[in-house]
Image (tube, rainbow, N blue to C red):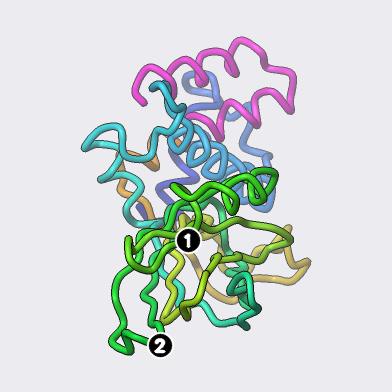
Amino acid sequence: MNNETLRIKLKQRLNKLSSNDYDNIENWQIIEAFNKAQLEWCRRQLHGNNLYKEGDEMSKRRVDDLQILLTELNLTGTETTLYFETNNFPSDYMEYKRVSTSATSECCTTPRSMTVYLAEEANVDLILRDNNKKPDFDWGETFCTMIGNKIRIYRDNFNIVSPILTYYRKPRYIQFTGVLNPYTGTVSTTDVIPEFKDDIVELILDDTAALIAGDIDNFNQMQREQQSAERNN
């Protein structure tokens, strides 16, 4: 969906029929509200309503809607006697998906795939003491934690090889050509359109209209748009 259509649809959601009541909304306000709305939409989709409250792959629709945000990053870092600690972390990071890695040992120099579980930092000592959970090259299993925008992949007499982080990135922020970018304070020289499919953009526009309606104390319109977005989610 191009940005001109986006603006027309947003004003149509806000204005009363055959009126121009809210045509004085600034373009930078539309940009800020839309970008906030798409972040909130993403977080709602990632947080589902199943047993584990994870919603990103609970249905084919969710997989299809969110796959555009899945990204891989080759991790670099240093090894200690206890773990491999990364020194690079994505600036557009939004949510963890998985870490995959290979490993080698003195007796096996050919890299083998390892299963990496995400663990809580508070449980590291307990896991390392548990013979059934601690890192084991023979079983091809280990665990990782996240701390201070770093990932620690734990090891025991084996070396971590070619680790990869798979994560959900933040959605691309829209921009209007010649309009002040509220995030950088500079005038945008390019037109950046939403990267989601048009049907998703329609839902995000409802959330955007609800945000702006709340800002201008139009609570009836705000409730209508919130209900519309949720009903079609």
Q: Residue furthest right?
A: 185
Name the quadrant containing residue 112: bottom left
Measure how far apart labels 2 and 1 are at the Cα level.
16 Å
Which quadrant: the C terminus? top left
Task: Check disc 1 and give the amino acid type.
Answer: Pro
Q: Residue furthest top?
A: 220
Task: Residue at 63%, 45% (x, y): give it.
Answer: 126
161 versus 201 height, above or below: below
> Which disc is residue 127 wearing?
none
List x then y, in percent, for residue 27.
64, 51
Task: Check disc 2 and give the amino acid type.
Answer: Glu
Q: Tag count in the figure?
A: 2
Task: Residue at 56%, 30% (x, y): give it.
Answer: 209
Circle 2 Cα neighbour tier, 10 Å, few/some/many (<14 / 14–19 / ≥20): few
123 is within the stretch colored magenta: no
Circle nearer the N terminus (2, 1) = 2
121 versus 107 height, above or below: above
> What residue does disc 1 label?
135
- Residue numbers of the magenta segment: 205-233
Using the image as rendered, state which of residue 56 and residue 115 is in the foreground.
115
List x then y, in percent, for residue 85.
63, 73
Using the image as rendered, state which of residue 48 and residue 186 is in the foreground.
48
Most frequent secondary structure within the magenta stretch: helix
Task: Residue at 39%, 77% (x, y): give it.
Answer: 103
List x then y, in percent, for residue 75.
51, 77
> What residue does disc 2 label?
106
Name the quadrant containing residue 232: top left
